[in-house]
């Protein structure tokens, strides 16, 4: 089953210095039917104004994955760790509840646009506090996984995050490890087809889709497109 959730259905915020779109309940946006999906707690796209910063905050036990779409960000924690990431890169925080974290747009004249995911972290797993990865313009790149396979960021959860980067007319089929996954369009128009070929959804920029009880998913690009497939077997 493939169920679309369009960008217009998502929660929104505009504080001037921060503009955001929320897939699931977050901050002032609350929907009791949308508190996350399996281990995926948060999926936001946010734009920080030049020079804007998020004040120090703590997190529940989650891995925070940031994909930088525009600009450059700096991340710091209260233990003294810090790292910068710019457009075309991904960064992950393996958060701890006794540590606070800050984020800043380091540019004085360019907005910072990024996509942020929170994934529940298993208590018995450990990984590096800050991890960094360059995103490639390839049809499919594994960017986060439980064991850091293929040079990906290492999650503290049985989940896999793939980035798809296709030109118009190209297609790619991915195997899904468990009963649930989530497809998020970043830009472009994309068709999502199930394995049986009897169901499909068309996603435009910012749309998402819940994937349930499908063994594989075929992505067909109607235009140059970029998307994430978040594989959530647990």
Image (cartoon, rainbow, N blue to C red):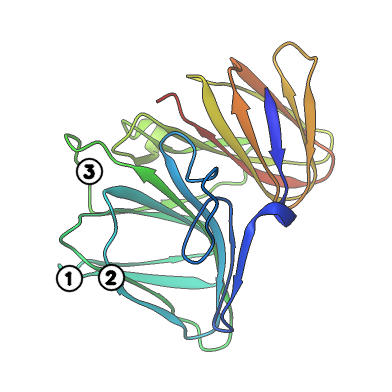
Q: Is residue 69 visible?
A: no
Coordinates of residue 128 in the picture (x, y in percent): 22, 48
* Residue 76 badge: 2
Q: Is residue 224 above or below residue 214?
A: below
State the image quarter where residue 93 is shown.
Answer: bottom left
Q: Quadrant of the C terminus?
A: top left
Is disc 2 in contact with disc 1, using a CB cutoff of under 8 Å?
Answer: yes
Give the spatial CA distance, label 2 vs label 1.
Answer: 7 Å
The answer to whether residue 192 is above or below residue 166 is above
Asked whether the viewer can see residue 5, the reply is yes
Quickly name the residue at label 3. Answer: 127
The total number of labels drawn is 3
Q: Which mark is residue 80?
A: 1
Question: How far from the left and from the top, in percent, is residue 32?
Answer: 51, 47
> Alpha carbon of mark 3 to alpha carbon of mark 2: how far?
17 Å
Residue 219 x, y percent position in the rendering: 72, 30
The picture quadrant where one finds residue 214 is: top right
First in residue order: circle 3 vs circle 1: 1
User: For this view, does 167 lie left or right of residue 178?
Assistant: right
């Amino acid at each position: 089953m493939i169920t679309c959730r369009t960008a217009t259905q998502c929660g929104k915020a505009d504080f001037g210095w921060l503009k955001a779109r929320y897939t699931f309940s977050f901050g002032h946006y609350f929907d009791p039917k949308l508190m996350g999906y399996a281990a995926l707690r948060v999926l936001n796209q946010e734009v920080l104004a030049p020079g804007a910063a998020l004040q120090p905050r703590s997190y529940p036990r989650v891995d925070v994955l940031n994909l930088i779409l525009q600009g450059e960000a700096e991340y710091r924690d209260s233990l003294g760790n810090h790292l910068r990431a710019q457009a075309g890169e991904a960064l992950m925080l393996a958060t701890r509840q006794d540590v606070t974290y800050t984020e800043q747009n380091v540019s004085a004249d360019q907005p910072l646009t990024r996509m942020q995911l929170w994934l529940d972290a298993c208590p018995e797993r450990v990984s590096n506090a800050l991890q960094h990865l360059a995103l490639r313009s390839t049809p499919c790149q594994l960017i986060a996984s439980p064991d850091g396979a293929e040079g990906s960021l290492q999650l503290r959860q049985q989940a896999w995050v793939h980035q798809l980067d296709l030109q118009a007319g190209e297609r790619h089929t991915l195997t899904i490890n468990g009963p649930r996954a989530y497809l998020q369009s970043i830009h472009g128009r994309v068709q999502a087809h199930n394995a049986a070929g009897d169901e499909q959804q068309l996603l435009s920029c910012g749309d998402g889709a819940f994937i349930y009880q499908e063994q594989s998913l075929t992505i067909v690009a109607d235009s140059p497109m970029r998307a994430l497939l978040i594989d959530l077997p647990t």
